[in-house]
């Protein structure tokens, strides 16, 4: 499991996409390693459906060489599927554009079922959740111990004169 930390993106209305139909249960699948990014578990979704029908025209590559990545995220702190899919359009000139697809309740339910079934090697949603929560509680305990020790340190009244 790879772990990195990232700030939550600012999502503008112009970044929200939708097409002429919703994502179907049978079109939801995952590939590759799951990655922990901040408090989210990131799942890569291969595009085995018509992108324009589901996401609309905005994220499509038009006369550009590149590719589109789609990610579903699971909030490890809240224990639920995040409200939007992340769509990243990568153009070979080095530019990237991010879009977001708001999930319906039915899509979130289907995605959660697929996340619970997905395995990458020995990693599962459940095993990564357990590891994340264990690491989080360990870090919080260390921070609490450090704060207590700092509060118990005597404050020195000794002053130091500058020596020349």
Image (cartoon, rainbow, N blue to C red):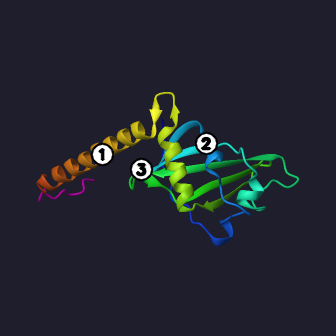
Q: Which sits earlier in the primary sequence, circle 1 or circle 2? A: 2
In depth, the one of 158 and 62 nearer the eye is 62
Q: Residues within 10 Å of mark 3 (few under 14, many from 20)?
A: many
Please state which of the two labelled residues, at mark 1 or mark 2, is closer to the viewer: 2
In the image, farthest residue toward the right: 63
The residues bearing labels 2 and 3 have C-alpha atoms spaced at a distance of 20 Å
Q: Which mark is residue 139?
A: 1
The structure residue drawn at horizontal position 40% and vertical position 40%, both measured from the top left corner, is: 126
Q: Which sits earlier in the primary sequence, circle 3 or circle 1? A: 3
Range of the magenta residues? Answer: 156-164
Label 1–label 2 contact, CB within 8 A = no
Q: Which mark is residue 76?
A: 3
> x and y percent of residue 82 in the render?
50, 57
The structure residue drawn at horizontal position 46% and vertical position 28%, both measured from the top left corner, is: 122
> x and y percent of residue 104 in the render?
57, 62
> x and y percent of residue 120 in the render?
52, 32
Q: Which sits earlier in the primary sequence, circle 2 or circle 3? A: 2
In depth, the one of 18 and 159 nearer the eye is 18
The residues bearing labels 1 and 2 have C-alpha atoms spaced at a distance of 33 Å
Q: Which mark is residue 152?
A: none
Q: Which mark is residue 29?
A: 2
Q: Secondary structure at mark 2?
A: loop
In depth, the one of 66 and 127 nearer the eye is 127
Q: Secondary structure at mark 1?
A: helix
The structure residue drawn at horizontal position 57% and vertical position 59%, both measured from the top left corner, is: 84
> x and y percent of residue 59 in the render?
74, 58
């Amino acid at each position: 499991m790879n772990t990195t930390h990232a700030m939550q993106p600012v999502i503008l209305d112009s970044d929200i996409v939708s097409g002429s139909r919703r994502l179907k249960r049978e079109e939801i699948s995952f590939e590759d390693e799951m990655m922990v990014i901040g408090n989210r578990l990131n799942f890569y979704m291969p595009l085995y459906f018509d992108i324009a029908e589901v996401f609309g025209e905005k994220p499509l590559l038009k006369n550009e060489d590149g590719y589109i990545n789609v990610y579903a995220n699971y909030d490890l702190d809240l224990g639920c599927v995040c409200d939007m899919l992340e769509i990243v359009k990568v153009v070979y000139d080095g530019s990237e554009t991010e879009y977001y697809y708001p999930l319906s309740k039915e899509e979130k339910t289907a995605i959660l079922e697929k996340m619970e079934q997905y395995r990458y090697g020995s990693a599962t949603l459940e095993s990564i959740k357990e590891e994340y929560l264990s690491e989080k509680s360990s870090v919080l305990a260390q921070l609490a111990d450090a704060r207590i020790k700092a509060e118990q340190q005597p404050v020195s009244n000794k002053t130091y004169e500058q020596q020349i």
